[in-house]
Amino acid sequence: MTERVRWGAQKIRSVALWSVPYYSRWGFYPQVLFVVFALVWFEYRPGWASQGPGVAMAFLAVAAMWMAVRGPDSTRIEGAIWIAISVGLFALEMHFIDTERKAHDAEQAELRSGEEETQREQTKSFGHLIKGGQQLLSALRTETALTAKNLEHITGGDEYCWLVPLDPEPVGPGGDRAYQGNNYWQLGLKNSGKVVLPTCDLRFTPFPTDEEQKQAIAPSPPFLFYHFEKVPVMGRRYYRYTPNFIKGDRIYSGVIETPTRSFIEVIKFQPDPNNKARYIPTCMVTSPSEKLLEKECNPQQ
């Protein structure tokens, strides 16, 4: 065993002392060690050996410093080998730079692709959100319209009822004999709209005639109150007889009240210029803001 160890040591020593043409030992061995270490580092890539452009530059800097140290003591072959090593390290540096740039470009492309995909998904989601909002708004509008329509049918909306003086209904069809003639007028009920009015209340104040003013007599009764329920739709040209009568010799000013609004009605009787025994009624309905709504007792349109 000792002989074999001794023989191995002699062989290693003989190899180490082996003379290389055009080389000195201080030029050959460092160069061999540098090449072997560089091959292990860049070729076999051990776990402890980091890779990248900076590492190749570090190896190149070490080679340049050794060449500067050796300087005039290096041979031409040694210098040429160092130059070849430097060129290889430079090429390796360019390779690392190119690889890193391609990896960076690929990473940026993947990031851009991810961002574009995210933007597409956000745009798509935003489109769905807008569409959902539009559908919700449409449904809300429909529901609002239905609610308004239902509310209009329940309350009568902005419509109103009003009373117009008519010639008393004849006795034959069911008229009251007590109010035939003597300037009595039967009141007809009208509906201004296209929905049934659930309730309609009218309160009139009769103004005194000229004769009553001279005698300081107050009209009797001082107020006329009428209450109607479920006033049907009948069109502007039509009316429904009521069992109520007024004397056609004065002005009646009243207030109309529906579930949602109030109006003002004035009924005025004036003598017929062609027949002094006959009176002609005029009717006027206005809103509280004095907007004229009706100006005829029996409109034909």
Image (cartoon, grey):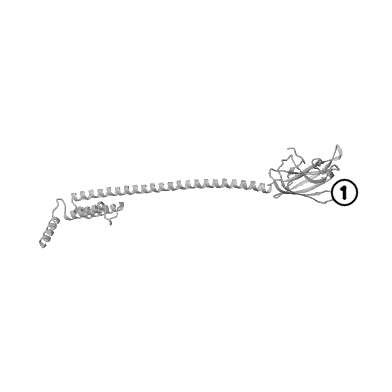
Q: Is residue 16 left or right of residue 230?
A: left
Q: Is residue 84 left or right of residue 216?
A: left
Determine which residue is flagged by label 1.
212
Of 56 and 188, nearer the camera is 188
Of 54 and 22, nearer the camera is 54
Of 166 and 135, nearer the camera is 166
**Residue lying farthest bottom?**
2
- Is disc 1 surrounded by few (<14), some (14 to 19) or many (20+) residues within 10 Å? few
**Residue lying farthest left?**
3
Please tell me whether mark 1 sits on a helix, a strand or a loop.
helix
Of 114 and 103, nearer the camera is 114
Type of amino acid under label 1: Glu
Q: Is residue 15 left or right of residue 146?
A: left
Quick check: 30 above or below 170? below
Counting every numbered tag in the picture gives 1
Give x and y (percent) for residue 152: 66, 47
Give x and y (percent) for residue 30: 20, 55
Give x and y (percent) for residue 27: 19, 54
**Residue lying farthest right?**
215
Q: Is residue 284 left or right of residue 56?
A: right
Q: Quadrant of the C terminus?
A: top right
* Residue drawn at (86%, 38%) of the image: 275
Q: Quadrant of the N terminus?
A: bottom left
Give x and y (percent) for residue 12: 14, 57
* Residue drawn at (27%, 49%) of the image: 92
* Quadrant of residue 291 within the rendered picture: top right
**Residue lying farthest top?**
274
Quick check: 8 above or below 165? below
